[in-house]
Amino acid sequence: VFFPASHGLRLAAWVVRSRLGRHIIPPLVYATARSVRVTGDAAAGPPAYQIDGECGRHTFPQGFALSLGVRERSLRVLAP
């Protein structure tokens, strides 16, 4: 899910909408995929991001490109 937000107040509004179940509306982008590529606007400055419940702590250069993917069967789980 991509919540477009230019500042913290807009992001907070998305969080409220999400909790109320009203978040699947434009301009929100909701999709599933095995991999995605995210690019940044050089003029927008460093992005704020969150992945899988963790706050992003890496800084990206202006005009960045980030590729994310899912590895199948990469986590072993022991079950009784």
Image (spheres, helix red, strand yellow):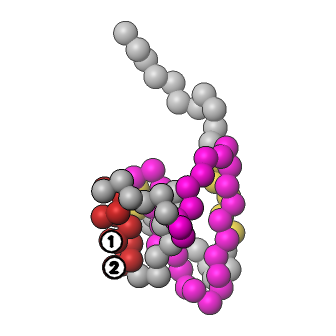
Q: Which residue is mark 1?
A: 12
Quarter-of-image position of residue 23: bottom left
Reply yes or no: does residue 45 show up in magenta. yes
- Please name the predominant secondary structure of the magenta segment in the image: loop
Q: Which mark is residue 42?
A: none
Indicate left or right for 18 with 52 as reference.
Answer: left
- Which range is magenta? 26-53
Considering only vertical position in the picture, is 51 above or below 42?
above
Q: Are marks 1 and 2 in contact (CB under 8 Å)?
A: yes
Q: Which mark is residue 9?
A: 2
> Residue at 65% of width from left, 46% of height from top?
33
> Residue at 45% of width from left, 50% of height from top?
52
Considering only vertical position in the picture, is 74 above or below 64?
above
- In the picture, which quadrant includes the C terminus? top left
Residue 64 coordinates in the image, percent (x, y): 66, 74
Residue 25 coordinates in the image, percent (x, y): 49, 63
Residue 21 coordinates in the image, percent (x, y): 36, 53
Q: Residue furthest bottom?
A: 43
The answer to whether residue 72 is seen in the rendering is yes
Look at the numbered disc 1 and give the secondary structure of its residue. helix
Reply yes or no: does residue 80 show up in magenta. no
Going by the numbered disc 1, the residue's amino acid type is Ala
Residue 20 coordinates in the image, percent (x, y): 30, 56
Considering only vertical position in the picture, is 35 above or below 42?
above
> Residue at 57% of width from left, 86% of height from top?
44
How many numbered marks are there? 2
Indicate left or right for 69 with 79 as reference.
Answer: right
Look at the numbered disc 2 and give the secondary structure of its residue. helix
The answer to whether residue 58 is seen in the rendering is no
Going by the numbered disc 2, the residue's amino acid type is Leu
